[in-house]
Image (tube, rainbow, N blue to C red):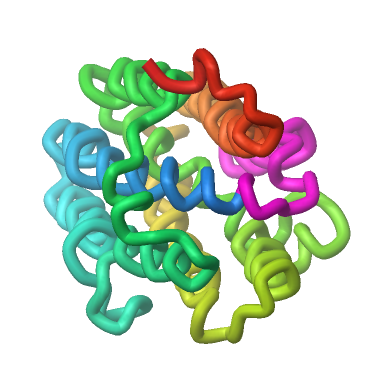
Amino acid sequence: MDVIERLDREVNEHVARTHFYHDPLTVERAKMLVRQHRLNTRQRNSVLKLMVAANTPDWDTRMKIITSSSQEVIADHEFGDGKAHWEVLQDLGLAIGMSKDEIEQAQPSVTMRICWLAWESLMRNRHWMEGLIANTCAERVNCPGYGEGEFKAVGFGGVQNRKWRELFGLSEDQVAFWKMHSEADVAHSNLGWETIARNAERMHMADEVVAACRINLAVWERYWNAIGDGGDAVQAGRTEGLYL
């Protein structure tokens, strides 16, 4: 297999392993996602991804990383009507009955903090090709073609779009976060996949890039599953140890 086929296999196996992608959505799982993923979107795109940009020698690739990060944390005029992605996620939280204070005062869970430390190790002082795959590998799950059935047809964002509309009775406009991520993550992840396709073999980095993809997806598996498990813990009144 060439390097892209190997990366696609890693993403497929990640989709199969990560139970949050396939579990039913509940109210508390949804609220936990809003609280935690809003924080993670801001941290990854204002700190972690910019570490990779700083290490990237190719100017065009560096600028594309910075542009995609700015869409997430400053303003997205292409997919988000001028709002940052974390703001659109916050709007989704308000639409399901969360208060603004509840969202803004949320603290990162223990698992979130551990994931941030893991990603910092995988993104700060690594070869820029390994950092680039850390930037983009999890965004592939929003691209059609991975997993089976509905997930393969529409990706993670498409599945979540349906689940949130059904559970909360939301309109298409109210679940804009999932639609824009389906669109934006195709573009963002293509940056990584296309750059890897052009350079990995030439630079003798194919094995390193695939290994970086595997370990980053292992971190993402724990991140997403912890959101679902955390929501279940809140619902059951068992929150000891969830936060520091």
| Magenta stretch, overall SS | helix
The C terminus: image quadrant: top left
Question: Does the image show residue 194?
Answer: yes
In the image, 207 versus 166, the foreground residue is 166
Residue extent of the magenta highlight = 1-29
In the image, 241 versus 180, the foreground residue is 241
Q: Residue at x 17, y 45 (%)?
A: 58
Asked which quadrant contains residue 17, the reply is top right
Q: Is residue 174 left or right of residue 143?
A: left
Q: Residue at x 82, y 64 (%)?
A: 150
Q: Is residue 218 left or right of residue 51?
A: right
Residue 162: horizontal and vertical position, in percent?
71, 71
Asked which quadrant contains residue 115, the reply is top left
The magenta stretch spans residue 8: yes
Residue 126: horizontal and vertical position, in percent?
28, 20
The N terminus: image quadrant: top right
The magenta stretch spans residue 239: no
Question: Does the image show residue 6?
Answer: no
